[in-house]
């Protein structure tokens, strides 16, 4: 099952390598990973998506918690949560497809953030599924480049992952 | 200088001062370019003594063995590059067995890092998967805190090695800083659990008291948490059988009638049978290693599993626990004893008597025997038994890895914790001699035996020189069968006795070799001279004696679990299996 795991950790050199090293070393799989400092500059927030059986996920959260620089770990998929990912996609937009690309972007509530006579660059935000669906829909045009941020997530309601 | 003015020290001096302040007497190491400032600081003081090994791997094993014998972190000091990489095997050895150790590695000057400088290696990257934690010092004034935290992390929670990587410029002698040893080492991201969950402990006690066929399965965690006394008390209160893992030997007295022996791949017949047929298993500080469980799908099918461990990640990793308890063995066991003693319900004595009757039958059937009559030569098992008699079962015994290790584990009955010192998890050949040295240096009055083989001993034999330098009177018991015995055994069993690279010809004359280093060498070739010559060896109190015992090369270690089978599927000899 797909899981979104959020990690609050010390914003220190090497901390990220410990997390990725752990996944590589123990054969866990990482679908996506995003990391940046929080409002508190001494802390980083890392979100990763992974796929595995419950047993493996349990080991992943336990092993992450063992890392000395990790402050807290939660599996967001255990409760109500919001996930978002940002994607920028550059497509060939000439002739008849130019209008079709614009229409498809509108349907997905994407924004065109860069224009040339022959290309559009579209920004799209949403769940991973939505972004994947958009990539399929936009295949009417030639996709030149895709960049996705990886998933970020946050729990709904009062629940927080903070100190 | 007034009491309130901190002393001004260089980074190198602060490092050594902080190590001394933690109470460390010995640092094991080897000098080199990146640590020369530190070595100069060592030279100028007398609180910390340095032990010069002949290869950095030996330094790590010495520090490791000190930690295994005492529970306190051993300290290693090596230079950058090859000094650090030579220490890697020893760090990994300590990591796999959860042994506290602080390893100071030199690093090239800060401004050279990343430029492929002379003797530069990314020790942070190399050591990351085999340490509990590692840290790189960026500012010299952080050194006291780095040292204090390294000890704290290494020794608390589930212990393990910590590497502190220090660029050379951080230890420069002419840059002085006010030295203060930090009193508070707390970290917001690291809070090892101090106590188990009382509700879970009650639940576990209830399950144990309702058991009809209970067993306690105790591992290295009991030893590292000094919880042997509590374990023994609980076992006595319950009256149940106890088995120890390879790492747990001595946690429960080896000659006690409640002890059924070691369990696992080369565990005793009765221990593996008792485990397999148990209805409640209390696992304490053990991690259901693959060398214990055999095929996890067939593991102890009828048992309710209670698992006490300080590390939550060890619980339900390979075998699911029905009643998990995260906490230090000592405090959890203490609480459990209290609950069991106060409980109105008692264990069913009739059921327990039947259980013991069954266990005794297993003991009668195949317990702890080897054939003495099928060879003219000395059996390795009888050599261990003789050493046990000669030392009254009270020696520190270190071992290398292979058949001799299993024979030592099976036939030297340890009645005290911290006395059996071996590389369990990583299985590091070359561990035995430096380990024995680390113990002997710290316990000079005690008998220290290194049980080894002619393969393993040659992996760190250069340390005979270190033994001369420091007068380390260890006794090396070399079970010499002329083969890499365990490899040969597997080749006999699985490869139709094709001895691919397991035969060692051109062995040195170990007696002459020992003598060349200034030690005593004794060779034993015949069963009838065993006791007398061993007694002679042990009579040289302060001398290193290399006892080269020529043993039967055909001998296999039994029992041996059948691969992919249940715990109680075992080969019992070359011709019998369960």
Image: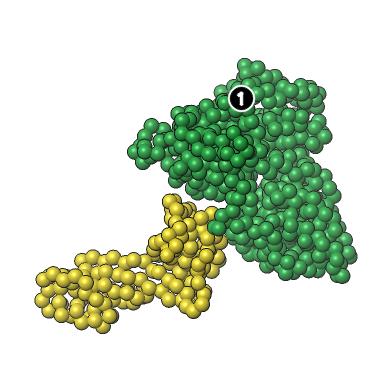
Quarter containing the C terminus of chain B: bottom right
Shade of chain A as shown in the rendered figure: yellow
Estimate the x, y position of residue B563 in percent, counting from the top left: 61, 53
Q: Nearer the viewer, residue B174 or B148?
A: B174
* Residue A115 appears in view: yes
Q: Secondary structure at mark 1?
A: helix
Q: Residue at x 78, y 65 (%)?
A: B205
Residue B460 location, quadrant: top right
Estimate the x, y position of residue B469 in percent, counting from the top left: 63, 21
Q: Nearer the viewer, residue B269 or A93?
A: A93
Shade of chain B as shown in the rendered figure: green
Q: Residue furthest front?
A: B2
Residue B33 location, quadrant: top left
* Residue A53 appears in view: no
Estimate the x, y position of residue B345 in percent, counting from the top left: 86, 70
Q: Nearer the viewer, residue B535 or B448?
A: B448
- What's the chain of the residue with tag 1? B
Residue B344 in the figure: left or right of residue B266:
right
Residue B122 in the figure: left or right of residue B78:
left
Q: Nearer the viewer, residue B192 or B343?
A: B192
Residue B169 location, quadrant: top left
Estimate the x, y position of residue B217 in percent, counting from the top left: 73, 55
| Residue carrying label 1 | B466
């Amino acid at each position: 099952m797909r899981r979104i795991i959020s990690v609050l950790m010390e914003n220190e050199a090497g901390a990220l390598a410990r997390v990725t090293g752990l996944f590589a070393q123990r054969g866990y799989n990482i679908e996506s990973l995003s990391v940046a400092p929080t409002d508190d500059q001494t802390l980083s927030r890392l979100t990763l998506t992974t796929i595995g059986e419950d047993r493996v996920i349990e080991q992943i959260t336990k092993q992450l918690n063992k890392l000395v620089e990790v402050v807290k770990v939660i599996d967001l998929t255990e409760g109500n949560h919001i996930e978002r990912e940002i994607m920028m996609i550059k497509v060939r937009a000439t002739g008849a497809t130019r209008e079709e690309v614009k229409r498809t972007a509108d349907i997905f509530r994407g924004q065109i953030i860069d224009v040339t006579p022959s290309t559009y660059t579209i920004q799209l935000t949403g769940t991973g599924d939505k972004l994947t669906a958009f990539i399929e829909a936009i295949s009417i045009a030639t996709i030149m480049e895709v960049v996705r941020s990886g998933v970020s997530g946050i729990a709904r309601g009062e629940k927080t992952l903070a100190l | 200088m007034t009491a309130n003015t901190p002393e001004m020290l260089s980074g190198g001096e602060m490092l050594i001062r902080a190590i001394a302040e933690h109470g460390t007497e010995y640092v094991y190491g080897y000098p080199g370019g990146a640590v020369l400032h530190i070595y100069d600081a060592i030279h100028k003081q007398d609180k910390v003594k340095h032990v010069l090994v002949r290869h950095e791997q030996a330094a790590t094993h010495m520090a490791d063995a000190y930690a295994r014998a005492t529970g306190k972190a051993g300290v290693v000091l090596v230079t950058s590059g090859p000094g650090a990489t030579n220490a890697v095997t020893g760090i990994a050895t300590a990591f796999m067995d959860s042994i506290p150790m602080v390893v100071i590695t030199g690093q090239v000057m800060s401004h050279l890092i990343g430029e492929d400088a002379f003797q530069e290696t990314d020790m942070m990257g190399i050591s990351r998967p085999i340490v509990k934690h590692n840290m790189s010092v960026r500012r010299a004034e952080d050194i006291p805190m780095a040292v204090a935290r390294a000890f704290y992390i290494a020794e608390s929670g589930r212990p393990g090695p910590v590497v502190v990587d220090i660029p050379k410029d951080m230890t420069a002698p002419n840059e002085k800083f006010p030295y203060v040893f930090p009193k508070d080492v707390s970290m917001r991201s690291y809070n090892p659990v101090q106590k188990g969950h009382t509700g879970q402990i009650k639940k576990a006690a209830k399950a144990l008291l309702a058991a009809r066929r209970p067993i306690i399965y105790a591992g290295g965690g009991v030893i590292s948490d000094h919880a042997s006394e509590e374990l023994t008390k609980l076992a006595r209160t319950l009256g149940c059988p106890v088995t120890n893992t390879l790492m747990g030997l001595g946690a429960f007295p080896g000659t006690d009638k409640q002890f059924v022996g070691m369990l696992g791949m080369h565990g005793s017949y009765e221990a593996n049978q008792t485990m397999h047929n148990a209805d409640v298993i209390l696992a304490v500080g053990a991690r259901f290693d693959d060398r214990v469980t055999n095929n996890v799908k067939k593991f102890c099918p009828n048992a309710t599993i209670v698992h006490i461990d300080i590390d939550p990640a060890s619980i339900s990793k390979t075998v699911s626990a029905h009643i998990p308890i995260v906490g230090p063995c000592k405090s959890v066991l203490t609480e459990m004893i209290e609950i069991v003693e106060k409980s109105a319900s008692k264990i069913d004595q009739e059921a327990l008597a039947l259980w013991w009757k069954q266990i005794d039958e297993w003991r009668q059937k195949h317990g702890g025997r080897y054939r003495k009559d099928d060879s003219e030569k000395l059996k390795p098992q009888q050599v261990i038994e003789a050493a046990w008699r000669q030392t009254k079962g009270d020696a520190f015994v270190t071992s290398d890895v292979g058949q001799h290790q299993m024979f030592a584990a099976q036939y030297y009955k340890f009645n005290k914790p911290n006395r059996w010192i071996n590389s369990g998890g990583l299985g590091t050949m070359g561990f035995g001699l430096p380990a024995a040295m680390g113990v002997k240096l710290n316990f000079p009055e005690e008998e220290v035996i290194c049980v080894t083989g002619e393969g393993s001993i040659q992996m760190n034999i250069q340390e005979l020189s270190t033994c001369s330098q420091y007068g380390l009177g260890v006794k090396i018991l070399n079970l010499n069968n002329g083969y890499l015995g365990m490899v040969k055994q597997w080749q006999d069993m699985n490869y139709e006795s094709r001895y691919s690279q397991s035969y060692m010809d051109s062995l040195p004359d170990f007696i002459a070799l020992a003598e060349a280093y200034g030690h005593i060498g004794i060779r034993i070739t015949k069963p009838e001279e065993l006791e007398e010559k061993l007694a002679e060896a042990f009579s040289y109190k302060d001398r290193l004696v290399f006892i080269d015992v020529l043993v039967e090369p055909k001998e296999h270690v039994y029992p041996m679990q059948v691969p992919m089978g249940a715990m109680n599927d075992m080969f019992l000899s070359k011709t019998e299996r369960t």
